Amino acid sequence: MTDTRAVPDNEMRVGHRDSRRYNVLRAIADGLRMIGSAIATVVTLPFRLVAKLFGGASSTASRGGGRARRA
């Protein structure tokens, strides 16, 4: 039998009928986050390549004095 007592919106109990809805929303949010991350990677890739090109050109033109490289 399902527990039908009132539970505040911010409190989810295991086995409560609203916990399934919470899990579905969390799964959708995780999926959207993954898609957004992939889109951000694709969009920023050309800019990173151009920055690397110009960053590499400027550091080879002047000996030393360039920005420190990231590890």
Image (tube, grey):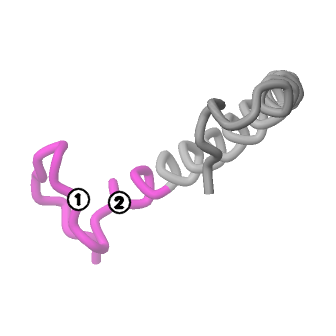
Q: Which mark is residue 22?
A: none
The residue range painted magenta reads 1-23
Say which element carries label 2: helix
Q: Amino acid at mark 1?
A: Met
Give the residue at mark 2.
Answer: 19
Camera-nearest residue between 40 and 30: 40
Q: For residue 66, what is the image quadrant?
A: top right
Q: Name the spot of residue 20 as percent of width and height, x first.
A: 43, 59
Q: Residue at x 33, y 54 (%)?
A: 18
Q: Residue at x 85, y 25 (%)?
A: 61
- Report the label total: 2
Give the side of residue 35 with respect to residue 17, left or right.
right
Q: Is residue 41 visible?
A: yes
Kindly indicate whether the residue at mark 1 contacts the one at mark 2 (C-beta within 8 angstroms).
yes
Q: Residue at x 35, y 60 (%)?
A: 19
Camera-nearest residue between 39 and 13: 39
Q: Residue at x 49, y 46 (%)?
A: 25
Q: For residue 57, what is the image quadrant?
A: top right
Give the residue at mark 1.
Answer: 12
Q: Amino acid at mark 2?
A: Ser
